[in-house]
Image (cartoon, coloured by chain):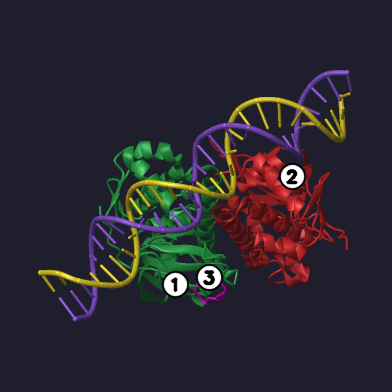
Chain colours: A red, B green, C purple, D yellow
Amino acid sequence: MTHVALHPLDTFVRKLESFAPFSNEERQALQGLPVKVRSLHPGQDIVHDGDQPSHCWLVLDGWVARYKDISQGRRQIMSFHIAGECPDLQSLHLPVMDHSLCAMSPSTVAYISHESLRVLMERFPRIAAALWRETLVDAAIFRVWMVGMGQRSARERIAHLFCEMYVKLHAVGLAEHHRVEWPLTQSSMAHALGLSNVHVNRAIQDLRGQGLVVLNKGTLTIPNWRALCDRAGFDPVYLHIDRRAAA
Amino acid sequence: MTHVALHPLDTFVRKLESFAPFSNEERQALQGLPVKVRSLHPGQDIVHDGDQPSHCWLVLDGWVARYKDISQGRRQIMSFHIAGECPDLQSLHLPVMDHSLCAMSPSTVAYISHESLRVLMERFPRIAAALWRETLVDAAIFRVWMVGMGQRSARERIAHLFCEMYVKLHAVGLAEHHRVEWPLTQSSMAHALGLSNVHVNRAIQDLRGQGLVVLNKGTLTIPNWRALCDRAGFDPVYLHIDRRAAA
DNA sequence: CGCGACCTTGAAGAACGTCAATGGTCGTGG
DNA sequence: CCACGACCATTGACGTTCTTCAAGGTCGCG
């Protein structure tokens, strides 16, 4: 099942609707938002710690990371975002960025001005509620990552990331049959999981040795989904994905 | 400077106003919210993983923790909340709890029904925006905790928690002169920081030995605020506290 | 061919966890 | 008043996980 987006905002609108469908008017208003599309190469920053953005960014294609650099070149990645996600809705209410966003793979994003979003939200409170909800789901994912870094072993954390990204990609039609493009380097995964790249490497080999994952040439395959979920302690409820999409 | 709350919701309303002041009408509508007050003893659950709450809880007094239990008795605490905070606004948009809340000290909380909040938000969109903003600040704090667990040493994490809670308590008038009530046990801190209680104990002794903190009989004193912030890598911008209150 | 980005491997050590025991404090009941 | 138990802080010994440093190895690409 490959999904053909008729409109750049399609995936985004469908995601916002997953809790409660919009009226035609609301849907059209969303799709009528003026957007500017831009391409990014891997590693390129979208917005940076300390900026005061006047736009939100909607991911249309590729993977985007939210990260924060601290002293001595240490970096923590706090989330990954894929097509249909708007990682920076918080800038609507918190004017100064307290972290950065960058592309992890060749990506395209759409710019939507705060101005036009505010007009839309004022006119359609249910759209505002749906956007608010999106930010709450992001927060739920942050919490699960916290639990992972506080309580899970390296292997469990890696397995958990595989499960999480597979479910998210599957929900928007970008993964099927437990196989998915995996653009992250082991160093990026290390930054996301609070581990060293060396340790990530060894832990992945371990998972490979147990037949839980196949990962090479940028493709991840999960031979035994149940087994990987078990190993990871993965329970997808926190992603708050529609049953229809998750099925 | 001790703060005398004229009304149970006072601290909450002032916090919501820290970004943009309300009109008298808005303020009165908030203070007119019907609330039920309840006392809690330490360890008592307020709401539990899997619940579908019909109320939000506003902390009036004491410390409240957000936590999640995973297998084998492991627990991760994801945030601490003090007077004036409403830790469960997310239940307005995500009906099923994916974590629990419990009191860490003798506490009092006020119940506010979703129903009455929804009516208020519909009538006053700026109140809705302020509540949304609160949930975004919570998310910003989650991110900082993630950075801590991923990148900081035990000592830094502990020092950072001391700094964070002091600033939060100071902002609502519950701390002064770098001295504050500290109701957490070392085990609770361990649950929050992703460490063992033994290691927390040794790290605290280290900080004590360096003259950075004094902690006994439930009181924390910070002899050298700058030095502790340095040790922790603490920068309070992520708390998004009003300059006036933070001064 | 040569370079850069990434993955892989080995060895040594630091940070942190686990287990187990001791002592302190406080409230409670005899 | 004292004894007791509950809860918490502390300490020691030992083991594991993870980091760091350093060195190859592979692959794609100019």
Pointer 2 chain: A
State the separation of the CA atoms marked 2 and 3. Answer: 46 Å
Q: Which residues are drawn in magenta?
A: B48-55
**Is residue B148 found inside the magenta-colored segment of the image?**
no
Q: Is residue B125 visible?
A: yes
Residue at the location (57% across, 66% down)?
Answer: B71
D27 relative position to A123: left or right? right
Badge 3: residue crowd in 10 Å (few <14, some 14–19, many ≥20)? few
CB within 8 Å, label 2 to label 3: no
Pointer 3 chain: B
Q: Nearer the viewer, mark 3 or mark 1?
A: 1
**Is residue B52 found inside the magenta-colored segment of the image?**
yes
State the separation of the CA atoms marked 2 and 1. Answer: 40 Å
Label 2 sits on residue: A184
Query: Which of the 4 quarters of the picture holds residue B7?
Result: bottom left
Residue A166, x across and y down, in percent? 75, 58
Q: Do circles 2 and 3 both sit on a common chain?
A: no
Residue at the location (79% across, 62% down)?
Answer: A224
Residue A66 or C17: which is nearer the viewer? C17
- Secondary structure of residue under mark 1: strand
Residue A105, x across and y down, in percent? 77, 43
Q: Is residue A12 visible?
A: no
Label 1 sits on residue: B45
Q: Is residue B204 above or below residue A242?
A: above
- Secondary structure of residue under mark 3: helix
Work out which quarter of the rendered image holds the N terminus of chain A and state it. Answer: bottom right
Principal secondary structure, stretch drawn in magenta: loop
Looking at the picture, which amino acid does disc 3 mark? Answer: Arg
Q: Do circles 2 and 1 both sit on a common chain?
A: no
Label 3 sits on residue: B123
Looking at the picture, which amino acid does disc 1 mark? Answer: Asp
- Secondary structure of residue under mark 2: loop
